[in-house]
């Protein structure tokens, strides 16, 4: 596994007192007010001098980390945040260090902690569902990559400026290699009220299942305004958790009670999974499939033209985006692009367009033609461009999909489906992007 030293960029000549307001880190980030404080770290608001945007800088005191024996947690936090990139997980942009401090440059969550919202009182069902949906989706994403958070609680859930949830604090997380994914974790982690029964009794436990339990406690707390398992005496509390002993307030609807019963099942083997939660009708309310095929014919494609140009016909049926997806997308749009120091990690390119779907497709096809790429797949409203295999060991396949924001306003998402990342970057930046200029209104990240 990667060593923390390998991923830290040592900044030379940095003043250890630099995190005072107005001081500048790496000639890029100007420190602002203190946002919060943990055991061995302080989190500051900072401004990226290149863009004027806000970021959060977590300043970790190396000496305290070593004294308290938190090297492993610190290393985990950095590695996990680098590993998981999701709209509902705080992004780690950069890591820097001096002899005494580690600086994590993180996405700024302007809305503060979800905990503060609950402190003001219980949330309405729709609001609670929205946070729960975002939490489960992000968690499902983590679990698929073998990452388990292990300390989920409202204090570790932050909100961005759009009110979207961001999972933070991966200090307790575990990252399992693919071959270990079914193995049992052995360390007792988490915060008492949110930990699963199998964690309480220190039997080995599966990270995914205990994360799901914590989500159940969070959902209950969001809806009720108080915890499902509570007692001043820790042993009594653990007993209640172990037996799954909780009761729902009378205003909880039946469908929520049923879902909670499936999540707060003390038997981890019978407990519902994130995948099954996402199929639950209460969970799905207000959500639409990410891409729903648009049924209506695109009127500006002439009949004879559609017959001749099949790919155009297939892709010229844009898919609708729901507001949830747009928000999560836009939250990631600016930040991911503005803070990318190089383009080597950027795998998707998005642009908005006011051209019709048929002319978007036709232009992409023209570019593919010029580059001698083949259009290999057109089902599901998606266009796939392939550079033939003879030219390289693995074919480079780029997919393009059109989404309709509003009538006459489209989002086009281009992604690498397979092939070499560098080659993909070269083609996108050097050929495809410039060639699409006539149909592009604005590229993602451009102001
Ligand atoms: P931590 O040490 O990660 O638990 O952070 C301490 C506190 O700083 C948190 O409880 C939040 O209130 C605040 N905080 C941490 N990260 C951020 C962030 N990215 N944006 C805004 N506030 C943050």
Image: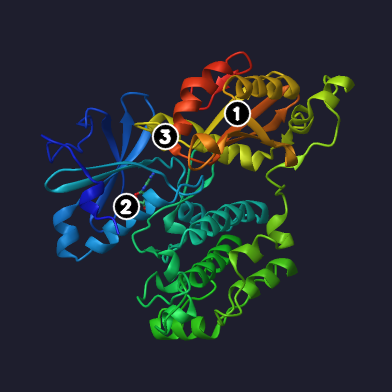
Of residue 76 and residue 110, the one placed in the foreground of this image is 76
Is 3 located above or below residue 257 in the figure? above
What's the distance in space between the residues labelled 2 and 3, CA to CA? Answer: 25 Å
Which residue lies most toward the top here?
438
What's the distance in space between the residues labelled 3 and 1, CA to CA? Answer: 17 Å
Q: Which mark is residue 422?
A: 3
Residue 168's x, y, as percent?
41, 53
Residue 162's x, y, as percent?
54, 38
Q: Which mark is residue 78?
A: 2
Of label 3 and label 1, which has the lower sequence position? Answer: 1
Residue 257's x, y, as percent?
68, 71
Task: Write the residue at 51% across / 44% down.
Answer: 87
Color encoding of the figure: rainbow
Of residue 370 and residue 329, the one placed in the foreground of this image is 370
What's the distance in space between the residues labelled 2 and 1, CA to CA? Answer: 39 Å
Is 302 located above or below residue 233 in the figure? above
Quarter of the image where the N terminus is located: bottom left
Task: Write the residue at 58% across / 75% down.
Answer: 264
> Under tag 2, what secondary structure?
helix
């Amino acid at each position: 596994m990667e060593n923390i030293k390998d991923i830290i960029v040592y900044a030379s000549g940095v003043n250890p007192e630099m995190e005072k307001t107005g001081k500048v880190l790496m000639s890029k980030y100007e420190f602002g007010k203190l946002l919060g404080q943990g055991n061995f770290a302080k989190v500051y608001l900072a401004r990226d001098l290149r863009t004027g945007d806000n970021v959060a800088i977590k300043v970790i005191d190396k000496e305290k980390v070593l004294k308290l024996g938190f090297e492993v947690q610190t290393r985990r936090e950095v590695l996990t945040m680098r590993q998981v990139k999701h709209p509902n997980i705080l992004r780690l942009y950069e890591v820097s260090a001096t002899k005494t401090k580690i600086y994590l440059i993180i996405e700024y969550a302007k809305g503060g902690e979800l905990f503060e919202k609950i402190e003001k009182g219980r949330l309405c069902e729709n609001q609670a569902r929205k946070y729960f949906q975002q939490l489960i989706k992000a968690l499902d994403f983590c679990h698929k990559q073998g990452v388990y958070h292990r300390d989920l609680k409202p204090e570790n859930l932050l909100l961005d400026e759009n009110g979207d949830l961001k999972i933070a604090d991966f200090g307790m997380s575990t990252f399992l290699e693919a071959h270990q994914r079914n193995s049992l974790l052995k360390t007792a982690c988490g915060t008492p009220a949110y930990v699963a029964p199998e964690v309480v009794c220190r039997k080995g436990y599966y990270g995914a299942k205990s994360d799901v339990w914590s989500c159940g406690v969070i959902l209950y707390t969001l809806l009720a305004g108080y915890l499902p398992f509570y007692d001043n005496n820790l042993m009594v509390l653990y007993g209640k958790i172990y037996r799954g002993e909780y009761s729902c307030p009378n205003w909880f609807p039946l469908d929520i009670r049923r879902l909670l019963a499936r999540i707060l099942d003390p038997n981890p083997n019978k407990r519902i999974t994130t995948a099954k939660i996402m199929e639950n009708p209460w969970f799905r309310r207000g959500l639409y499939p990410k891409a729903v095929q648009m049924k209506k014919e695109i009127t500006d494609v002439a009949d004879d033209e559609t017959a001749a140009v099949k790919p155009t016909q297939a892709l010229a049926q844009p898919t609708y985006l729901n507001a949830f997806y747009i928000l999560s997308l836009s939250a990631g749009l600016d930040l991911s692009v503005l803070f990318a120091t190089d383009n080597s990690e950027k795998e998707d390119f998005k642009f908005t367009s006011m051209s019709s779907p048929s002319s978007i497709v036709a232009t992409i096809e023209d570019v593919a033609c010029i580059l001698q790429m083949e259009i290999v797949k057109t089902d599901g409203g998606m266009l796939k461009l392939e550079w033939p295999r003879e030219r390289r060991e693995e074919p480079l396949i780029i997919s393009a999909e059109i989404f309709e924001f509003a009538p006459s306003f489209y989002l086009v998402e281009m992604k690498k489906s397979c092939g070499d990342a560098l080659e993909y970057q070269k083609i996108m930046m050097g050929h495809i992007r410039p060639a699409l200029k006539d149909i592009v209104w604005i590229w993602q990240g451009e102001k």
